[in-house]
Every structure is written in structure tokens, then in C-alpha cells.
Amino acid sequence: MTGLWNDFNDAQSNANLIPKGTLAKVRLTIRPGGFDDPSQGWTGGYATRGSTGAVYLNGEFTVTEGPYARRKIFTLIGLYSPKGPDWANMGRSLIRGMLNSARGISDKDQSPQAQAARRIGGFADLDGLEFVARIDVGTDAMGEEKNEIRAAVTPDHRDYARIMGTAGHGYQPPAQPAPQSSTAQQPTAPATPGRPSWAE
């Protein structure tokens, strides 16, 4: 007897990958590794130190909307490698792109406001960051294909505003370097319960 449930040779393999080059809004959650090095600014237990001596942020990126909503992509963000500076430079570049994307800044913008928005007080500032990512395909330790995030999409991209949900909303970066009076401050609690203040 041969049928669909006896012979699986013609069954499609389900790689379950998001296609390479897909743009999606994602939220970063850093899975704490408990490694701190205050001299590097690595505090709060966010960094992870691997068996090779490499140090990284263990990133879990959750797609927040669209056809791949709730899908998770796991990517390591390099902080240090004993093999040289390349991995750390790639990590710094990714974080710069993530900040540009999350805070609505062009990568070419060198104004004092843009420079201030690219600074963080610590890795806690990255935990929960939402930005537009370009999804890539790489391989895991076993040689199997897996999704990765290697680049963020900034406001210069034609699809950024649509994906980020900022079209026509005049998005303002959360960090304002100029002192403001207390009357000009943004409300800390959303006016509508369950809705973030930026969506008001």
C-alpha cells in the first residue's frame, strides 16, 4: 500500500526560513549571559562569554508584525573575539544601524542630535529596542541554514516608514540632548492603556 502517509519521498522539505532580504520590524531581547567587564562598559550581566573567549550579546529578535509576526531569529552580536577586531567591529556596526533605525536617524546624519541618539548608557538600552531589520540566511554550527540579522534598515530606505509605522507621524528620537522645560516633556505613561506612547 502506497499513499501520502506511507511514502514521504515526495513530501516538501520544510526549511521554515524567512526569505533572505525580507524587511521586517523586530524587537530585540538580549538573553543575559552574566558576563561583565566594567572597563569595557559591559555591565548588567547582558554579555555572554563563550568557551573560546569570545564575548557577545545573545540576541533574540522577534518579528512584531506582518506575515512572519511572532517568528524568532537568534543572532549573536559580537563584542570581542580573541582572533581580532573584525567580530567586534561587525557588532558595533550592527548596533549603530539598530539605533539609527529605532530612533529614525539617517546613517549620514552627523548632527549633535544624531550623535547623541547613537549613544547608550549600557546594554539595557538595547533590550527591547524595535527597529527595521533586513533578514539574512546563514548557517548554524551544524551547517544547517538559519535566519540571521546582520543589518538594520534606516530612514533612507524607501520602505522604512511603511514598515516602522512612522509614515506621516513625524517620528522624534527619544533622546533629546537639549534641555527641555518640564512642560515640554513627553508623558511617561501612555494615554490609552496597553498602547505605547509613540502610538498615540
Image: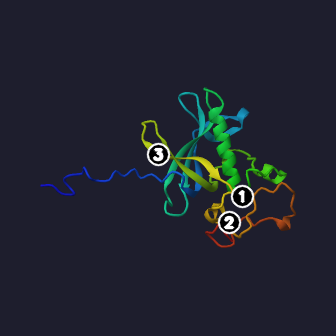
Name which residue lies at 39% across and 50% down. 15
Residue 130 spot, x, y in % from top left:
63, 56
Do the residues bearing badges 1 and 2 touch, measured as CB atoms within 8 Å?
Answer: yes
The numbered dot on residue 104 is 1
Quadrant of the frame with the C terminus: bottom right
Q: Earlier in the sequence, mark 2 or mark 3?
A: 3
Q: Which residue is mark 3?
A: 146
Q: Is 59 above or below relative to 178? A: above
Horizontally, residue 9 falls left or right of residue 109, namely left
Q: Which residue is mark 2?
A: 166
Q: Is 178 above or below relative to 81? A: below
Residue 142 spot, x, y in % from top left:
42, 36
Horizontally, residue 54 falls left or right of residue 182, namely left
Quadrant of the frame with the N terminus: bottom left
Q: CA distance from mark 2 to mark 3?
A: 30 Å
Q: CA distance from mark 1 to mark 3?
A: 28 Å
Q: The disc labelled 3 sits on which kind of residue? A: Lys
Q: Secondary structure at mark 2?
A: loop
Residue 63 sits in quarter: bottom right
Name which residue lies at 65% across and 73% down. 192
Residue 198 sits in quarter: bottom right
Q: Nearer the viewer, residue 194 or 73?
A: 73
